[in-house]
Image (spheres, rainbow, N blue to C red):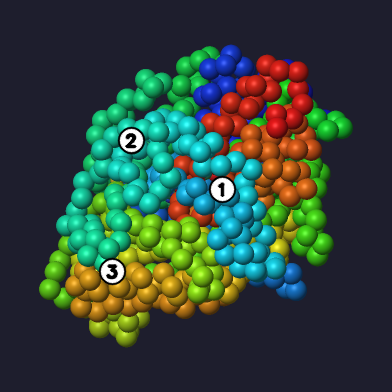
Amino acid sequence: MAKKLPKVDVVIVGVGWGGGIIAQELTKQGLTVVGLERGKERKTEDYFMVHDELRYALRYELMQDLSKETITFRSNTRIRALPMRQYGSFLIGTGLGGAGVHWNGQTFRFLPYDFQIRSKTIERYGEKKIPDNMTIQDWGITYDEMEPYYDRFEKLTGISGEENPLGGKRSSPYPTPPMKQTPAMKMFADAATKLKLHPYMMPSANLSQQYTNEDGVSRAACQYCGYCERFGCEYGAKADPVVTVIPVAKKSGKFEIRTHSHVRRILHTGNKATGVLYTDVTTGEEIEQPADIVVLTSYVFNNARLLLLSKLGRPYDPATGKGVIGKNYAYQVIRGGATGFFEEKEFNLYAGAGSLGMTLDDYNGDNFDHSDLKFIHGASISFSQTGQRPVANNPVPKGTPNWGKDFKAASIKYFNRALGVGAQGSSMPFRQHFLDLDPTYRDAFGDPLIRITFDFEEQDRQLAAFTADKCGEILKEMGATQIDVRRELGPYDITPYQSTHNTGGVIMGASPDISAVNNYLQMWDVENLFVIGASAFPHNSGYNPTDTVGALAYRAAEGIAKYAKGSGGLLV
Ligand SMILES: Cc1cc2nc3c(=O)[nH]c(=O)nc-3n(C[C@H](O)[C@H](O)[C@H](O)COP(=O)(O)OP(=O)(O)OC[C@H]3O[C@@H](n4cnc5c(N)ncnc54)[C@H](O)[C@@H]3O)c2cc1C
Ligand code: SF4
């Protein structure tokens, strides 16, 4: 029998960016909030003097322990899914701050086209442009409606950047100036400009200068240490939930965080959630936390999984296309890029930051004509200088042996002479790509794991070949002496790292037949349950997701506050 605690106004499942923003905003409204986080407490001091590539980047110290809980994967419904027993394609965060602690801080807005993708594609190219089984849909919100929330997330985090010449309209400039431009970034910008493209400085949560936000949180400038992605920031320069939203929520006296608290079910009666059931993993005790409002902020996979385990919402069935929980899982097309080798030039690539680079959007969204192309949407193309760490970086030209004396010689020679120009390709949803509960494999508590069914489609292969060629053209203009272009995408392989930009499963939309949540991320079927994160994205864009996750969290917080003060019912 679970121990039952006194009721609170709001219980949050998972305390990353989503959970942290909800806690900060709802405590400002006077609501009492409990945040349940399965991982441990985290603080900036944990990262003092530990630039340890093996420990963090290669042994994943900050990530979810896959021996306790993982995902299973199969490329289609005809084969059995197998568990991901070691990290590959993506990394899943855990602990206070979630993946927000070890992200890069590349903070892009999605394009206006993204939010109205279906209607805008039909308007320009006709319905036939969309393949039968591609399940794109409008998001139930426009870019103009999203803009104020983007603005709030960017002011919260102090984003350093300059206007994207091909992006949506901004109501105000970025709060801090762009990061420093390195010589390699300047080469990229000059080459792209010569090719009549529109490069701009990558928007960065790493901070070009000291910044104090509207909540009085002050952070230092980035030191370009290069140990950013997969690491916590020892200077507190990188915006993360632990140094921004969580302290503000705690200071209110209305936010209680319980770490080591693994939520296993959302409790409900009829069409209302009544609280959650969780296990204190330090004692094994089962605890019930009743609440008036339940907010899921436990990332794409656990948002969908907890709904399915709790039998809430209508599970998606790929055979009929009906149901919504698990629908429209999407990923990204990262592998279509190019590496240039420079015989005559050396760069200081060990210096860098998680979001130090230049980007262009000429081939992203619908910024170019797709009439003669066999794909829709596109990719942002970037050169990033994130810091070339010594263990995992061995760029060598095609044809170099994979081991031995020649490999070592080439690896040393090219360590500071190779530049990658990469494409971050969008990912469209297809009827056959989805999340559901695995019938075979279970976690340490005995609960079914979430299962991913996904593969690359012809859309993705065409997109990768197209963007790889564009990356190669830029490197040629930059003066690379050898260029290795990666045009071939092949089937999706879950073993090499690609991107932790998984999306979908609890998608938003204008009506309950095609979506699980409305544009306040309130569940259509359970009015006091809100589901926040990239799980709400009906497709994935050609950018990193967190600006959009943060913006939607601000919008959801506004909706939850309205719901809490009103007389109930759906907000839309
Ligand atoms: C290496 C890396 C680099 C990245 N770089 C970028 C970037 O440059 N730009 C960008 O936009 N995005 C980037 N991302 C993605 C970004 O980190 C995520 O979009 C963002 O952190 C998601 O926030 P979230 O709050 O939705 O989820 P999370 O940060 O994953 O937080 C969810 C929290 O829920 C907890 N949780 C899960 N299940 C349970 C449960 N059952 N009970 C209790 N707690 C639970 C987890 O422990 C976790 O703390 C990167 C991700 C990684 C891994
Ligand atoms: S690169 Fe900058 S923001 Fe990233 S960890 Fe180092 S100092 Fe912090």
Query: Is the residue indicated by label 1 positioned so its CB lies within 8 Å of ligand 1?
Result: no
Q: Secondary structure at mark 1?
A: helix
- The residue where tag 3 is placed is 474
- The residue where tag 2 is placed is 173
Query: Is the residue indicated by label 3 positioned so its CB lies within 8 Å of ligand 1?
Result: no
Is residue 556 visible in the rendered image? The answer is: yes
Q: Residue at x 63, y 50 (%)?
A: 138
With respect to residue 261, does 542 lie above or below? below
With respect to residue 398, does 564 lie above or below? above
Q: Residues within 10 Å of mark 1 (few under 14, many from 20)?
A: many
Mark 1: amino acid: Phe
Query: Is the residue indicated by label 2 positioned so its CB lies within 8 Å of ligand 1?
Result: no
- Ligand 2 positioned in quadrant: top left
Q: Residue at x 53, y 17 (%)?
A: 28
* x then y, percent, for residue 530: 67, 34
Q: Quadrant of the C terminus?
A: top right
Disc 1 and disc 3 in contact, CB within 8 angstroms: no
Q: Secondary structure at mark 2?
A: loop
